[in-house]
Amino acid sequence: MTNPASIADTDHNALADLLMNNGLDNSSDDIDDLTSDNSNYATLTDALEQTVFESFDDGLYIGMMSGTSLDGMDAVLCQFNPEMSNEDNTQPPMQLLATYSQDFPPRLREVLLALCQPNAVNQLVPEANEPNSELDWFGWASRAYAEFASEVVNTLLQQSDIDAESVLAIGCHGQTVRHRPQMGFTLQLVDANIIAERTGISVVNDFRRRDMAVGGQGAPLVPAFHQALFGASDNTRVILNLGGIANITVLPASEEVQVVGYDTGPANLLLDAWISLHTDNAYDAGGAWAQSGTLIEPLLQQLLAHPFFAQAHPKSTGREDFNLTWLQNELQAFEQANANISYSAADVQATLTELTAISASTQINMFVSPSKNSSVYVCGGGALNDYLMARLQAHLPHCTVKTTEHLGLAPTWVEAVAFAWLAKQTLMGETGNLPAVTGANKGVVLGQVCFA
């Protein structure tokens, strides 16, 4: 499972060992045949691409995702068609074989939320044998996250009646607890070693930092997958992911035009936080609570004044910029400047919904027009928010707004499948980033592999 480009100079004995370790015939004569001047293979890299790597393209992969909203962990078992980028191919590009989702254990979620905010762990009250410093909490959570992820994988396999030996790799993004592209780093929390041990499956993780090493934002990473799975030659498609943060991927009809993708602003992150603060609900089902409120136009304009919205792409954001504390500070400033305006908690929810809809649609409208055949396909938990979907449609009069269900993949599983695909790209030694999207100076193979 080595990148072919890194083993072009492998000697004869090393190649024999590599083939034997992968269950292939490694007799001296066979290897000589593969690499002789009379062979069809010009280099050892070519030989390996036809042996070790051939089966990695269409095997089974598990993808895992826990997003910014921290509402739970999603896991998928899928198989990719090796010709998924070939438009003439009639096979489905991907088969979704099984899915499983589980809420975080309450204590782990509490700690993860605290780690997402600088020094917020100081507000945690340690229980017996628990840490009392931020770095120790990070180590505790890395292990607890991995143990939980392992349980999710094993449950997925058990329910789908699939042996671990049949799965080539797990793509596990981990939990982002700090994303500082302006400082050149990002931090995802997970101990892949534990997952590999508990499941018996190799794990690919740490996808973002290689992109950052070549000047990229490390986000968003899913546009490359969107292009591979959802791209079409006859019309422009925009994939809008409404997770904790909203991000878009613009897939142009012409191959001569580059794919564009970036974060547009907050989505479920603020909506979930606000409704959790005022009700017993973890999220606004269908957007019913927001729909019961009234838009606070001056507050909306104040929130839209956040400098992120005016930044040029490529750009990415997260809880560092948008969080409940930021919202509460904005509300305090709003009340001081508008003492004559009264509002309810539901009105704030309506305004936050409009903030997501207008910040995303403003960006999408830059790439679509009445003269273009364009469609917007929504994925992520926000695709289930009927009121938010209606507000998006209102701001996108030149497009039809649908969910990715219309493209053959349910909106709740798109990101998990994306990280299964990214794991496959890593094992195949193929690039996983789009420089035009992340701002990187070149395409690179993403991720670290922890072999089982």
Image: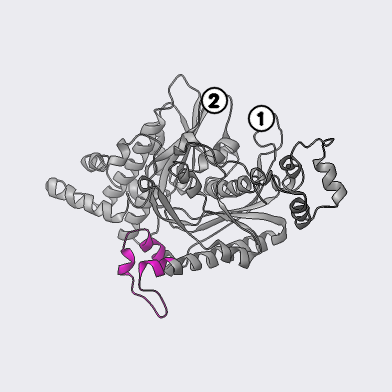
Q: x, y percentage for residue 321?
A: 32, 49
Which residue is at 71% across, 37% downward? 91
Crowding at dot 1, Cα within 10 Å, few <14 / some 14-19 / many 20+, comes out as: few
On screen, residue 79 versus residue 122, left or right, reads right
Which residue is more in the foreground, 80 or 441?
Answer: 441
CA distance for labels 2 and 1: 13 Å
Task: Identify the element where label 1 is drawn.
Answer: loop
Q: Which contiguous range is marked in magenta?
A: 110-138
Q: Is residue 2 magenta?
A: no
Quarter of the image with the C terminus is bottom right
Which residue is at 36% across, 48% downward? 183
Q: Amino acid at mark 2?
A: Ala
Q: Amino acid at mark 1?
A: Glu
Crowding at dot 2, Cα within 10 Å, few <14 / some 14-19 / many 20+, comes out as: some
Visible residue check, residue 329: yes
Quadrant of the rendered image containing residue 353: top left
Considering every residue shown, the one lying at the far bottom of the view is: 128
Which residue is more in the foreground, 14 or 213?
Answer: 14
Q: Which residue lies under the disc numbered 1?
A: 87
Q: Which residue lies under the disc numbered 2?
A: 253
Label 2 or label 1, whichever comes before in sequence order: 1
Relative to 405, say whether 73 is above or below.
below
Visible residue check, residue 249: no
Which residue is more in the foreground, 387 or 47?
Answer: 47
Evaluate if marks 2 and 1 touch, with contact meaning CB atoms under 8 Å apart: no
